[in-house]
Amino acid sequence: VTELGVKIFNHLEPGIEGADVVMMLRLQRERMIGALLPSAHEYFQCYGLTESVLSAANEDVLVMHPGPINRGVEIDSRVADGPKSVILQQVTHGIAIRMAVMSMAMRTHDGGSAIEQPN
């Protein structure tokens, strides 16, 4: 991936330094059984997004997460509910966006155009 310009970080702070947007993803607890993580608490200590960690990003950073959130695992509640969070808007708009994408895909599948062309 480094050939593609991707930088790999072992700690969250340098990875989000100067970021305009921080997108967290859900740790899937159902897949933790037998995984390399001893506990959700340890994961949070290493990779959880807290206010302190978020201070490495730009001052007007937006925090995103597709939900559902495991509070205290991937993101602290103060960050998830804070003024920089757009998580609720993301989840709300995500439903409409997925419906639109599915509609476009179905039109394309049926031989139509994904984007209606004006006459």
Image: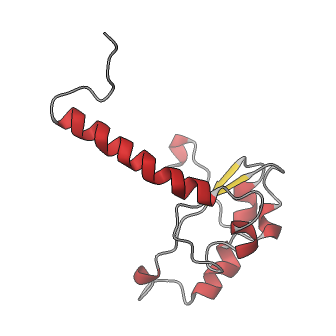
Which residue: 57% across, 42% down?
A: 5
Q: Quadrant of the C terminus?
A: top left
In terms of depth relative to the viewer, which is nearer, 1 or 74? 74
Residue 75 in the image: above or below residue 36: above
Q: Residue 112 in the image: x percent, y percent? A: 20, 27
Instruction: Identify which residue is drawn at 52% across, 41% down.
Output: 4
Name above or below for residue 72 compared with residue 99: below
- Residue 46 visible from this viewpoint: yes
Residue 110, horizontal then vertical, whole percent:
15, 34
Specify whether 28 is left or right of 87.
Answer: left
Q: Position of residue 54 (x, y in %)?
A: 77, 62
Residue 38: image quadrant is bottom right
Residue occupying the point 46% across, 76% down = 28
Q: Residue furthest front?
A: 119
75 lies above or below 31: above
Above or below, 96 against 69 in this view is: above
104 horizontally vs 48: left or right: left
Q: Nearer the viewer, residue 6 or 89?
A: 89
Where on the picture, by quarter, is residue 82?
Answer: bottom right
In this rendering, position of residue 21 left or right of residue 116: right
91 or 73, which lies in front? 91
**Coloring basis for residues:** secondary structure
Q: How many marks?
A: 0
Residue found at the far top of this picture:
119
85 lies left or right of 116: right
From the top left corner, tell me how far across and down residue 64 is, in percent. 62, 57
Q: Using the rendered image of the protein, determine whether residue 8 is visible from the camera's viewpoint.
A: no
